[in-house]
């Protein structure tokens, strides 16, 4: 079992940046693949990014490649998502996740709202 708490959401203008953080507690953080998903109003949840246990394997959704960067610090039990060049279509609730698959979905945080104004 692992508990996940996101922070860092907010309101920014298009073209701006935000950094989301996720703090994990519970079982050993480093055993989990970590990820981020998002859900926009009226849409299904979608995968955003994931990072392997060691940090050597990283995956991004095509919609965020080149703009978002996922990273993790196993010593601090945290995973972050640096989001640059934000667009209005990035508006969503962002969820931190943990699991064993490349798109981890076994454990979910409560979500943090990101709103991008045009």
Image: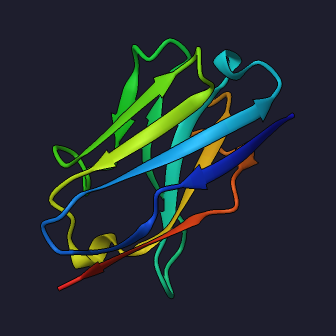
Which residue is pictured at 55% across the width and 65% down the height? 112
Q: Quadrant of residue 56?
A: top left
Total numbered labels: 0
Which residue is pictured at 46% across the width and 57% down the height? 8
Q: Quadrant of the C terminus?
A: bottom left
Above or below for 9 versus 76: below
Above or below for 83 versus 116: above
User: Percent from the top left, x then y, of residue 53?
Assistant: 56, 17
Q: Nearer the viewer, residue 25 or 48?
A: 25
Query: Would residue 116 appear left or right of 10 to someone viewing this image?
Result: left
Q: Is residue 102 visible?
A: no
Above or below for 34 versus 63: above
Which residue is pictured at 69% across the width and 35% down the height? 24
Q: Quadrant of the N terminus?
A: top right
User: Percent from the top left, x then y, of residue 89?
Assistant: 28, 76
Query: Would residue 1 appear left or right of 82 to someone viewing this image?
Result: right
Which residue is pictured at 32% across the width and 45% down the height? 82
Q: Is residue 81 visible?
A: yes
> What coloring was used for the rendering?
rainbow
User: Percent from the top left, x then y, of residue 88?
Assistant: 24, 78
User: Percent from the top left, x then y, of residue 19?
Assistant: 36, 50
């Amino acid at each position: 079992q692992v508990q996940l708490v996101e922070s860092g959401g907010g309101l920014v203008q298009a073209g701006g940046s935000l950094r989301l953080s996720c703090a994990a507690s519970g079982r050993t953080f480093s055993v989990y693949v970590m990820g981020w998903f998002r859900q926009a109003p009226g849409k299904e949840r979608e995968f955003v990014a994931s990072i392997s246990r060691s940090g050597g394997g990283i995956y991004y959704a095509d919609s965020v490649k080149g703009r978002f960067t996922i990273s993790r610090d196993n010593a601090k039990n945290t995973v972050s998502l640096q989001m640059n060049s934000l667009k209005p279509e990035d508006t969503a609730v962002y969820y931190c996740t943990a699991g064993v698959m490349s798109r981890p979905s076994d454990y979910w945080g409560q979500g943090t709202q990101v709103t991008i104004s045009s």
